[in-house]
Amino acid sequence: MDKLAPTEIRYPYAIVRACSELPYLSPFVAMPDGFLRVVLKIVQKINLRNPFSEIFASRKTLADEAGKSLDTVHRSIQWLEQNNLIERERKARAGLRGSRSPLVPTKSLLLALGLVDERGVPVEPKKAAKAAPAGMDDGQLTTSSSNGPELTPSSTTSAKEEGGYTRIGAVCLPTDLIWLCSKGLSPFAVLGLMKRARTASQRLSDVVHAAKKYLENLKANQLYAYLQTLLTSGRDFSAPYREEAKKDEEKREKSYLLEKAEIYEGRRFTSRKTGKVYQVESGVIRETVNGQSRVTPFNRAFLEALEAGKLVQHN
């Protein structure tokens, strides 16, 4: 008999995002690397509708799914328990010998993963968000390399700019944040930081722009943790960015008007409405009325009057 192909498990977006961010979250910075796959399998079994409910998964099941030994599973669970990320309550089996000890996620774990708010209320997942393949939790969405995200070849080769965004695989990120991926963050980790920035009424792009010189030498976990700290500092990062953007805009406007003034140099125009005569001279506009003249800087309003046909070339 032919074997049936294994069914592909698809996890909710909130779980995929949580798995992607997990290696960079401060509670897990000190976690031994060998525990990662076990912990990811535990997180994948959290009930989003009732996050504090028990996780019924035998140690053998976790070992088989994570590809780890039973001893590694026991030590992983012990580490989570010692760090107040899960709780275990031994329960006798009704009518049977022995007992069981289901895992119960703590508020500390669920809050760090963004699955509940400060009150412990489950965070409502976005309706439009799609589930992602189960296999993405251990390779495509997370990274253990300091040389950059472990994107699949198709993700890398298909990356393309779409306006102010760049697509990496199934994720679209603001183009100015793509360099974070080259520093070791997965695309989903960047999305997680963007969500945290919105919660703090900030824009991640503003935070990164303001602190870029401090971020250059950081990698993966350090970078993620530092950005998290900045986002919870209460500092307004948008003000300096707005000021710099304003200066850049003024500079572009000045350059644009200078270019246009050179084009119209020496030409004279008459107002259809008032009959006033205007002449462009050395980057300024000379206005003549009844033999008297005054000079004003070459400006955007003059160009708009030309485009609207309010000024006609003077013969």
Image: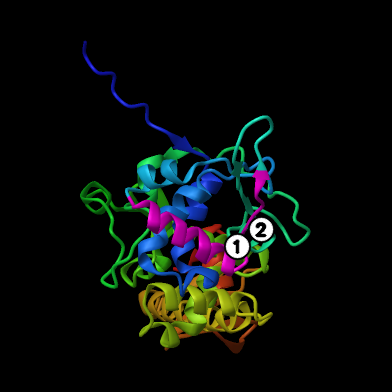
Q: Nearer the viewer, residue 265 or 159?
A: 159
The N terminus: image quadrant:
top left
Q: Nearer the viewer, residue 73 or 97?
A: 97
Residue furthest to the right: 119
Identify the amino acid type marked 2.
Thr
Identify the amino acid type marked 1.
Leu
Q: Nearer the viewer, residue 50 or 259?
A: 50
The C terminus: image quadrant:
bottom left
Separation (CA) of disc 2 from disc 1: 5 Å
- Badge 2 local density, few (<14 within 10 Å), some, or many (20+)? some
Residue 74's spot in the image, x, y percent?
46, 57
| Residue where numbered disc 2 is placed | 106
Residue 254 drawn above or below residue 44: below
Residue 58 drawn above or below residue 9: below
Residue at x 39%, y 66% (from the top left corner): 185
- Left-right relation of 120 to 161: right
User: Is residue 190 among the parts visible in the rendering?
Assistant: no
Q: How many marks?
A: 2
Residue 295 sits inside the magenta stretch:
no
Residue at x 21%, y 14% (from the top left corner): 2
- Left-right relation of 99 to 213: right
Q: Nearer the viewer, residue 12 or 302?
A: 12
| Residue where numbered disc 1 is placed | 85
**Figure quadrant of residue 94:** top right
SS class, disc 2: loop
Labels 2 & 1 near each other (Cβ < 8 A) = yes
Q: Which residues are magenta?
A: 68-91
Residue at x 45%, y 70% (from the top left corner): 31
Residue 179's spot in the image, x, y percent?
35, 70
Residue 313's spot in the image, x, y percent?
46, 66
Residue 81 sits inside the magenta stretch:
yes
